[in-house]
């Protein structure tokens, strides 16, 4: 603006004929060129996209504006991987279900135990008060006697139901199911992280899930496990498979040697002769004790109910004595059975026996595998067995040697295979 005003002033103030030509020089602005990328025609072949992006079966982009893009499966993620992730989701859901139901049944055990003991002790107290009051109290004493008889009868029915379902044993079942489902979940995650899963892995995972569902059912009616079997049977939570033919030539590869196979066979013998036999013996003792307690509790409350009933019809002091004493004994037996969780102890022994049975079958099936390449690496397998038994590799080999010497000399084996439990 200043240059324009100056030029106007010079033009207006010129008085001579000599014209003053003012030249205004305006600097030239630099030319800025914008490069617009040219749109490529969609002539790239699908094979070039495959080589560039590592995709297979990629559908090329269509020229139609209204067409919908489609996404197809990539080669980096197989269908077996998708299926294993679906199995993982189902396992996570089962873990949560067993955990919640376990907490619920633990509450059952606590609430039923406290309620039945309170009912039993209250009924015994009422029977004692009625007997001590005598005949002169009239209607009030009769009410105490009737209430005592009704409460003893109710306690008997509740105790029969509680002994039938064994809430403490149900809780232990859910604890074990939760632990085993988490273990399976960890195994599948490891396979997805370090391995290349195939359809056989998917089938194997589904079989394990269904075997766990069968071993630890959630509902009570129809499929509940027998709480009082004739004898202890180890828990089985793995799919049963036919063992391969053991007639094979020894091939020292994949980490397997003749010495390692002999060591694993000796470990199996120790598990059979010591660990499994011991836990089955202890489990049968716990089972027999639980049977006696489960029968004694309702029997004592029933006797107390009969004693209270005889108190109503007669004023015999012996009836009151029987009712009070039987009620107190029933409360003590009920507390020992369910407060001490004898059913849980039996279930613990049953699962421990199942753990050792699973180890036996796992080792035997691995040793009987004909194709050595299909076996798990021998050194890795030995380490897993040692960790499951709570031993170091040197301790595991020492146990195998002691077992071999004891069989040769005919002396009993004085050591267990497991040091965990």
Image (cartoon, rainbow, N blue to C red):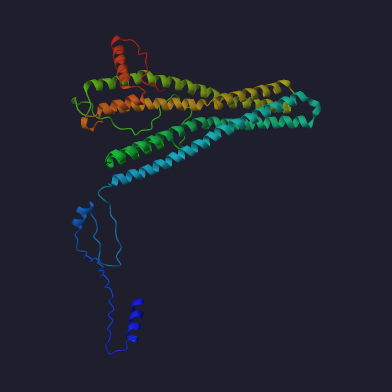
Q: Quadrant of the C terminus?
A: top left
Q: Quadrant of the N terminus?
A: bottom left
How many numbered badges does the structure rendering display?
0
Depicted 415 relative to depicted 127: above or below: above
Figure quadrant of residue 177: top left
Residue furthest to the right in view is 136
> Where in the figure is residue 371, as x and y percent of width and height?
21, 31
Q: Nearer the viewer, residue 116 or 12?
A: 12
Depicted 203 relative to depicted 332: above or below: below
Figure quadrant of residue 376: top left
- Residue at x 31% of width, y 40% of height: 193
- Residue at x 27% of width, y 20% of height: 263
Q: Is residue 304 left or right of residue 215?
A: right
Q: Nearer the viewer, residue 9 or 42?
A: 9
Depicted 73 relative to depicted 140: above or below: below
> Where in the figure is residue 332, as x and y percent of width and height?
60, 23
> Where in the figure is residue 33, as x and y percent of width and height?
25, 69
Q: Is residue 149 left or right of residue 68?
A: right
Q: Is residue 221 visible?
A: no
> Where in the figure is residue 96, as x and y percent of width and height?
45, 40
Q: Nearer the viewer, residue 382 or 293?
A: 382
- Residue at x 45% of width, y 20% of height: 282
Q: Is residue 138 visible?
A: yes
Residue furthest to the front in view is 16
């Amino acid at each position: 603006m200043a240059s324009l005003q100056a030029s106007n002033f010079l033009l207006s103030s010129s008085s001579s004929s000599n014209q003053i030509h003012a030249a205004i020089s305006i600097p030239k602005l630099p030319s800025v060129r914008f490069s617009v990328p040219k749109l490529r025609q969609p002539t790239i072949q699908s094979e070039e996209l495959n080589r560039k992006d590592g995709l297979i079966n990629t559908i090329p982009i269509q020229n139609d504006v209204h067409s919908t893009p489609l996404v197809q499966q990539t080669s980096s993620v197989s269908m077996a991987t998708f299926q294993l992730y679906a199995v993982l989701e189902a396992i996570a859901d089962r873990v949560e279900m067993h955990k919640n139901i376990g907490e619920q049944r633990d509450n059952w055990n606590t609430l039923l135990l406290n309620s039945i003991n309170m009912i039993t002790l209250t009924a015994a107290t009422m029977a004692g008060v009625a007997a001590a009051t005598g005949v002169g109290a009239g209607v009030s004493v009769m009410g105490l006697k009737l209430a005592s008889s009704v409460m003893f009868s109710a306690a008997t029915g509740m105790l029969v139901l509680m002994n039938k379902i064994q809430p403490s044993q149900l809780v232990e079942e859910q604890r074990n199911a939760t632990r085993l489902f988490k273990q399976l979940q960890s195994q599948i995650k490891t396979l997805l992280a370090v391995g290349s899963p195939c359809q056989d892995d998917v089938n194997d995972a589904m079989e394990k899930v269904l075997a766990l569902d069968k071993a630890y059912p959630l509902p009570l009616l129809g499929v509940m496990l027998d709480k009082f079997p004739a004898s202890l049977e180890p828990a089985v939570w793995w799919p049963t498979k036919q063992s391969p033919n053991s007639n094979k030539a020894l091939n020292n590869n994949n980490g397997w040697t003749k010495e390692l196979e002999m060591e694993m066979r000796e470990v199996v013998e120790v598990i059979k002769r010591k660990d499994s036999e011991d836990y089955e013996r202890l489990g049968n003792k716990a089972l027999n004790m639980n049977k006696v307690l489960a029968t004694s509790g309702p029997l004592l409350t029933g006797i107390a109910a009969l004693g209270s009933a005889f108190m109503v019809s007669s004023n015999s002091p012996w009836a009151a004595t029987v009712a009070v004493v039987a009620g107190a004994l029933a409360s003590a037996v009920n507390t020992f059975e369910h407060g001490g969780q004898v059913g849980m102890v039996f279930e613990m022994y049953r699962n421990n026996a199942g753990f050792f049975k699973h180890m036996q079958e796992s080792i035997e099936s691995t040793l009987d595998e004909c194709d050595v390449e299909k076996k798990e690496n021998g050194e890795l397998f030995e380490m897993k067995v040692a960790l499951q038994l709570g031993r170091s590799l040197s301790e595991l080999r020492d146990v195998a040697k002691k077992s071999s010497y004891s069989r040769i000399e005919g002396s009993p084996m004085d050591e267990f295979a497991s040091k965990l439990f």
